[in-house]
Amino acid sequence: MTLPLGLDYASALIFALTGALAASRAQLDIVGFMFFAALTAVGGGTLRNLMLDRDPVFWMADPMPLGIAALAAVTVFFGAHLLESRLKWLIWLDAAALAIAVAAGVSVTRALEVSAPVVVVMGVATGTFGGLIRDVVANEVPLVLKQGSFM
């Protein structure tokens, strides 16, 4: 397994957990958990791949991130009630996923030999877009845009 692929899988897992936690906070059914987990898991990488004109998009070429998201959704669906604060876990996992996904985005983009500003923008897009779209779909102010949300 290559480093970019490992980072994509790791960020998909952690972002899927945050998506499922958001679904739990919204009291959705198992289908909602799956939707939020998948949307969050592949959102940033999908934007990155579309902007870089990489064909096919990573999860279409290798559907493993969708399987990872489904497993995360089921795990959270049956285990979220054991957590004292789903929001606290969501914030911590979001921060961890952000760090991993930015590294994934940078790694994938550097391999394409594009300019440094493009590498930086693609790293940020990969790390933030999945969580942003999760929060928008959940009708929440995106965590990454809230002042002091990680303190």
Image (spheres, grey):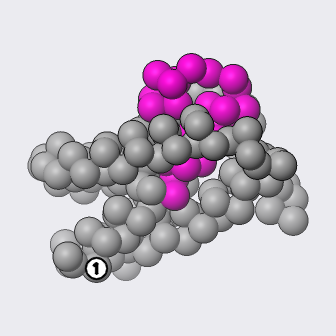
Find out whether residue 17 is within the magenta segment: yes
Quickly name the residue at label 1.
3
Vertical relation: 3 (above or below) 89? below
Q: Which span of residues is magenta-colored?
A: 14-35
> Is residue 69 rendered to the left or right of residue 93?
left
Residue found at x 45% / y 32%: 34
Residue in the foreground of this view, choosing between 18 and 72: 72
- Left or right: residue 31 versus residue 57 is right
Instruction: Please state if 111 lies on the left or on the right of 51 as rendered.
Output: left
Magenta stretch prevailing secondary structure: helix
Helix, strand, or loop for circle 1?
A: helix
Examine the structure image and report whether residue 119 is included in the region drawn in magenta.
Answer: no
* Quadrant for the C terminus in the image: bottom right
The residue sitting at 62% across, 31% down in the picture is 23
5 above or below 39? Answer: below
Q: How many numbered tags mark residues here?
A: 1
Give amino acid for label 1: Leu
Where does the image place residue 117, in percent across and percent down from the top left? 41, 73
Q: At 58% across and 35% down in the image, what residue appears?
A: 77
What residue is at 65 percent from the left and 37 percent from the top?
22
Q: Which quadrant of the figure contains the N terminus?
A: bottom left
Task: Identify the image quadrant of residue 110.
Answer: bottom left
